[in-house]
Image (cartoon, helix red, strand yellow):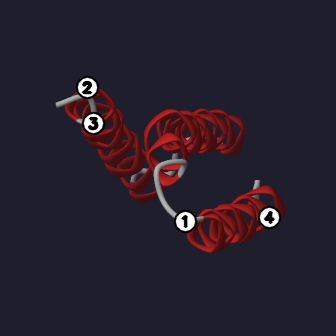
């Protein structure tokens, strides 16, 4: 199944991010230098943004392509839902 590759990649990245967040927690608990904490926080933020980009790419390739086989009204609904999700993601990022 084509969806398995992005799913595995996303899960692997999320596990790494989880480790980064735990590392950040440790740094705060241990009183690490602010610049070091900020640097690691920026790295975790960038990693989360990369996961979002992978999800967007996979959705464009698989979900929207699949919607082309559906009636036009359903295609428009799928596209609108995707546009809403992208807008929310961009506002966050």
Using the numbered discs, state the Cα–Cα distance from disc 2 to disc 1 in whole angstroms: 28 Å
The disc placed on residue 3 is 3
Residue that mark 1 sits on: 71
Q: Choose between 91 and 38: the one closer to the eye.
A: 91
Alpha-carbon span between mark 4 and mark 2: 25 Å
Mark closest to the chain's N terminus, 4 or 3: 3
- Residue drawn 20% across and 33% down? 4
* Residue neighbourhood size for the residue with mark 3, other residues' Cα within 10 Å, grouped as few (<14), some (14–19), many (≥20): few
Q: Residue 36 placed where, x, y %? A: 62, 34
- The mark nearer the N terminus, 1 or 4, is 1
Cα–Cα gap, marks 1 and 4: 24 Å
Q: Image quadrant of residue 10?
A: top left
Mark 1 lies on a secondary structure that is loop
> Which residue lies under the disc numbered 2?
5
In-image side of 8 versus 37 (left or right): left
- Nearest the viewer among 33 and 86 is 86
x and y percent of residue 71 in the render?
A: 54, 65
Which numbered disc, 1 or 4, marks the residue closer to the eye? 1
Q: Residues within 10 Å of mark 4 (few under 14, many from 20)?
A: few
Residue 52 x %, y %: 56, 45
Q: Give yes or no for contact between labels 4 and 3 (Cβ–Cβ under 8 Å).
A: no
User: Which corner quadrant holds the N terminus?
Assistant: top left
Q: Which mark is residue 87?
A: 4
Secondary element type, mark 3: loop
Secondary element at image label 2: helix
Q: Residue 19, relative to residue 30: is it above or below?
A: above
Q: Which mark is residue 79?
A: none
Look at the numbered discs 3 and 1 and tell me whether their residues touch, using CB distance below 8 Å: no
Residue 80 falls in which quadrant of the image?
A: bottom right
């Amino acid at each position: 199944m084509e969806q398995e590759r992005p799913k595995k990649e996303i899960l692997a990245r999320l596990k790494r991010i989880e480790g980064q967040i735990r590392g950040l927690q440790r740094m705060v608990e241990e009183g690490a230098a602010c610049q070091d904490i900020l640097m690691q926080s920026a790295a975790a933020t960038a990693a989360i943004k990369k996961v979002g980009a992978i999800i967007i790419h996979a959705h464009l390739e698989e979900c929207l392509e699949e919607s082309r086989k559906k009636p036009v009204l359903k295609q428009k609904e799928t596209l609108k839902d995707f546009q809403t999700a992208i807008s929310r993601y961009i506002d966050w990022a």
